[in-house]
Image (cartoon, rainbow, N blue to C red):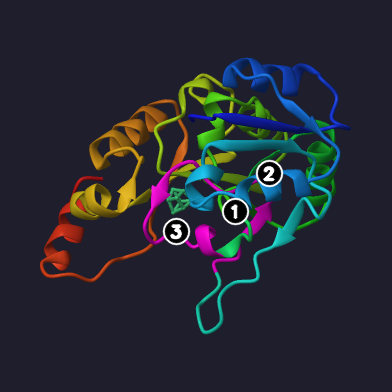
Amino acid sequence: MKIDTLFMDHSLPLDDETGYLISRIHLEPQRIQDPGEVYDFINRSDDPVSLAKRTLYLTRNKGALIRNCPGTCHYTCCDYTILHAGTFCTMDCSYCILQAYFHPPVLQYFAGFEPVRQALQAVFLQNKIFRIGTGEYTDSLIWEKVSLMPEFLVKTFAEQQNSVLELKTKTVNIESLLNLDHNEKTILSWSLNTPEIIRSQERGTASLTARLEAARQAESKGYRLAFHFDPIVIYPGCEEQYKTVIQKF
Ligand code: SF4
């Protein structure tokens, strides 16, 4: 994660979580009263999407932390529950819907372990199986290099029985998770594509070989794995190339 500008909501305390993040970013945060200051900073740029990938806003999630994924019309819903831990992404896939979805695009990290813990406890108490993930509005593991949140989530899910956490990524950022006692309640999940699409369309992401090697490491530590093709791109020769990818795992 390469961040040039760090904004921080004026009401956020400097505690273990925010202090760790600031120490990893190596930038002094600019304290702001109003999120509009971040929006204006990004909107003034000739290239708001690129600037937003290098500008981090530490704040709180002032809306719902957990929500049902609305699904997409005419598609079969995969019954995903969203844990809203952050927005946007530092990588740069040409097809990324987040670049059109957020106006303006803002890379936000939602601080606060305690509200997350409370929201999850309310879910865990329900007599239902949940698949909960942080990968809907951001890449789940871009944060692993700067935040203790992924580690906190793996440990929190390990203490309950009826839900699984899915961390979905195009990175290989799993180092801090490998030796945790995850109790098989976390699924480490990779979004895959063919080497041609990764090379030409997924700028700043890990190679297919690196993603699969990270998956092997995770498997050796007992993690459950998932793989997504999201999207599948139709181009000459794609059928054979997708088959080759599948044969690799
Ligand atoms: S890794 Fe995912 S969230 Fe990040 S730019 Fe690519 S598609 Fe978007």
Q: Specify the segment rendered in magenta.
A: 78-100
Instruction: Tell me which label, 3 or 2, sits earlier in the chain.
Output: 2
Q: Which residue lies furthest to the right in this view?
A: 11
Residue 240 quadrant: bottom left
> What is the quadrant of the C terminus in the image?
top left
Label 1: few (<14), some or many (≥20) within 10 Å?
many
Q: In terms of depth relative to the viewer, which is nearer, 25 or 20?
A: 25
Q: In terms of depth relative to the viewer, which is nearer, 103 or 120?
A: 103
Measured in 3D between alpha carbons, the distance from the residue under mark 2 to the one under mark 1, in whole angstroms, is 16 Å
Q: Can residue 108 be seen in this view?
A: yes
Secondary structure at badge 1 equals: loop
What amino acid does circle 2 point to? Ala
Secondary structure at badge 2 equals: loop
Mark drawn on residue 96 = 3
Q: Is 67 positioned to the left or the right of 98 in the image? A: right
What amino acid does circle 3 point to? Cys
Measured in 3D between alpha carbons, the distance from the residue under mark 1 to the one under mark 3, in whole angstroms, is 12 Å
Q: Name the residue under label 2.
A: 85
Instruction: Tell me which label, 1 or 3, sits earlier in the chain.
Output: 3
Residue 61: percent from left, percent from top: 79, 46
Q: In terms of depth relative to the viewer, which is nearer, 112 or 27?
A: 27
Tag in front: 1 or 3: 1
At x 56%, y 33%, the residue is 143
Secondary structure at badge 3 equals: loop
Residue 91: percent from left, percent from top: 43, 43
